[in-house]
Each structure stands twice: as structure tokens, then as C-alpha cells.
Amino acid sequence: MRDADNIRAVKESGVDWMGFIFWPDSPRYVQQISSRAGIIPDYSSLTDLDTLPKRVGVFVDDMPQNIVTRVVNYQLDIVQLHGNESPVMIDNLRRTLDPDIHPGIEIMKALSISSAEDLQRYHDYVGHVDYFLFDTKTPLVGGSGKQFDWSVLDGYDGDVPFLLSGGIGPDDVERVKSLSHPKLLGIDLNSRFETAPAMKDVELLRQFVTAVREG
């Protein structure tokens, strides 16, 4: 998300968390440019930030000081690490943020999955993160619109809650409703609900969220 009006509309669709991507190579990259420039709105115009869903900042092998700056400027609740970040880096980041800058900040580690073996990498991060995000393994860093074989999730026997990502779209309602893993916390909805990069189809989101929750 990065358009102020779209953010306000999406928050009414029933989503619980909202993502802001701070990876410069992403077409959804959030820059701090004034809305007067007609490109990306200044987030100071979002005077109702406190009423938004939880805010997730997405980073890819970024410098810790950059992450800290975004946590402060965008009042992030969760830091999602989508690169090759080590457990040591994650621990140091948490100590920097919590409690002095953001008490109780949560950290999510994304893992790219194409096989049961990929899934087992989660062991490296147990005790260091609050959530996992299991995404489709591609040459890109997320946002591929492709799904992996969800049956490999049966091999996840950890205690850390996880979110499922990777190409979930409006036609996946029944597949999502059929998932029953005890540690599945939620699903990530992105490219297949967009009219353009970082612009969400609010009605599609609302319909999907309602249909899933009714199940």
C-alpha cells in the first residue's frame, strides 16, 4: 500500500494487517514523496494512522538503521524480513527497537518454499521471530503471483504461527477455507487483488475476506 485514499478504503474491507514495501526494486516501493508532486502521497496526510490495521513493513536485506527509520516514520507494528537476514541480525534489530523505540515490536521472517526441504529452514529462526511467512520460491523476491504446493505445509511442526503467501487470488476461497493447519494465522493477499502495483481492488478484497470468514 502507498496511496492514501486506497489505504483508507482498504482498511474498511475487513483486512487485519496492511503491508508497506520498502524494497527499492519493488514496483510497490514506498517513497516519502509529497502528494503535491502527484506521485506518492505524504504519509503525514494520514492523520488517522492509529485507526489503521496493523502495519507491516517489508524489507529485503536492508540496513538496520533504514528499518529503524521506517518503523518510526510509518509507525510500523511488524517488521517482515524477506531476504537472507540472519538470526543474529534479527536479534540485534529487535534489541535496537524494543523497548526503547517500539516496545513489543514483532518480527516476521519470510521463507521461499518450493519443496518440503525448503520448509525445514524454519528451524534456523525458531526463537528469533514471532511469525513466519511461507511464500513461493521464484527468481524474484515475492510478488510473483504464483502458488507453491500447499501440501508441504503438512511438514511444518513448529510452534511459531505462520502466514501463507504466494499467488492467492479471488478464485481461491474454497482452497483457503479447506486449510486446517493449527499454526496457520492468516493469508497474504497482494498482486491478484490489484488494479495496478500498490493499488488494491477494494471490492474484490471485501468479497474475498467476507467469503473466507463465513466459512
Image (cartoon, grey):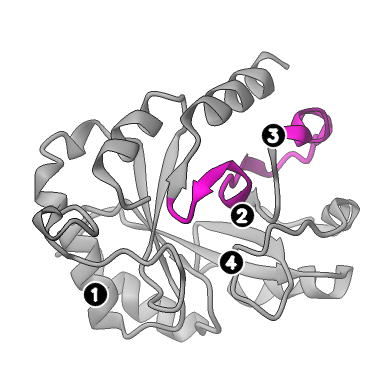
Q: Which residues are magenta?
A: 170-198
> What residue would you read off at disc 4?
110
| Marks 3/1: CA–CA distance | 39 Å
In the rendered structure, which amino acid carries the disc numbered 1? Thr
- Quickly name the residue at label 2: 160
Is label 4 in a helix, a strand or a loop? Answer: strand
Element type where label 1 sits in the image: helix
Quadrant in which residue 207 is drawn: top right
Residue positioned most to the front: 38
Q: Earlier in the sequence, mark 3 or mark 1?
A: 1
Q: Is residue 197 left or right of residue 121?
A: left
Left or right: where 70 falls relative to 120: left
Location of residue 180 in the rendering, given as x and y in whole percent from the top left corner: 80, 34
Q: Position of residue 53 (x, y in %)?
A: 35, 36
Closer to the N terminus: mark 2 or mark 4?
4
N-term mark: 3 or 4: 4
